[in-house]
Amino acid sequence: MKFSKPYIFAQWAALISLFLVITAGSFVRITGSGMGCPDWPKCFGQWVPPTEASQLPSDYLTIFQEKRSKKMLKFCKFLNALGMHETAEKIQKDPNMYKDEPFNVAKTYTEYINRLLGFLAGNIMLLVFVWTLIRYRNRQLVLLSAINLVFMGIEAWFGSIVVATNLVPWTITVHLFFALLILLIQLYIIYRISPKFQAKIQIEKATLIIWWIVFGITFYQMFLGTQVREHIDALTKQGLGRDAWSDYFGWEFLIHRSFSWLVLVLLVYLGVKNEKGPKIRMVRWAFVTLAIELFAGVLLAYFDLPGLVQTAHLIFATVLFTILGMGIFRFRKIA
């Protein structure tokens, strides 16, 4: 089936919008703006948030803390229904659940922009779903678009849970998992509809196996990275500044760093082999992206974790994950 250029463009727009959401989410995290809007889907009870605290009710702290508490208790009931009693109890007993979140215009609008980008991405994905359903009616594409749309809804709902639980670390990890899953499905849709990417690339069996290993490690690495970040959040709550973080890293950081070097060794091997043989562009891009991502990681680990580098680290990790994912779809072993 042949797909129109505007349709392919719309699918690419959906993918790019997902990248923007992940980037914005990372920036929200490093600036501590996750609670810039203490409610959801509105922000301080408004579709367009205020610019000054004077525009809010005098008891706004109490109002929004109570709203969050109600949503948090509903989520705990949901966890209890799933049998996750210990997790629900920990959330309810966590004193951070009941902390007030004073208005901060910079944090509020940082989080608000993040939400707007999420809203944009959701609407683009709704558009391509309707387009696929009406114009093409390809069963697999309709199903994939529908699944991705449902996942976007779950991701938005879980975003409200992240807010309601005052950024409980594991909820942020789950939030990232859904983002990567949505990204991977969208990438597969593009692979299916784009003539450029439908062409299979023949590679040796050993190369394909190593590529799969690198893909798996990279996926795991992104979650290890969130564990490192959770550890940092705990240190921050203890009053330790950015300059002291690297002195208190746990086992998660050591594994994260070791796996990074393993991925580098494997991709160097693939890169050298590629240059001597087929010279596949995707392998080259994977190597270059990893080099930049590792450089950002070194800056994070040994140069006091500069804030903006954290965003770059996640962006290039996501780009690498995307390149590896496309390779999984397109590579086929030589018969």
Image (tube, helix red, strand yellow):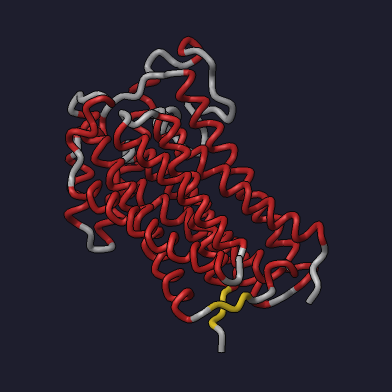
Residue 332 falls in image quadrant: bottom right
Q: Compare residues 60 and 86 and report the one nearer the observer.
A: 86
Q: As displayed, is residue 272 above or below residue 209? A: above
Quadrant where the N terminus is found in the figure: bottom right
Quadrant where the C terminus is found in the figure: bottom right
- Going by the image, does 26 lie left or right of 199? left
Residue extending farthest to the front is: 276
- Going by the image, does 85 lie left or right of 12? left
- Going by the image, does 87 lie left or right of 60? left
Q: Compare residues 305 and 17 and report the one nearer the observer.
A: 305
| Residue 55 x/y as whole percent | 51, 13
Name the residue rendered at 18%, 44% in the picture. 250
| Residue 201 x/y as whole percent | 62, 75
Name the residue rendered at 46%, 51% in the picture. 290
Q: Compare residues 202 and 145 and report the one nearer the observer.
A: 202
Residue extending farthest to the bottom is: 335
Name the residue rendered at 41%, 36% in the picture. 310
Name the residue rendered at 64%, 66% in the picture. 189
| Residue 218 x/y as whole percent | 40, 58
- Going by the image, does 34 lie left or right of 170? right
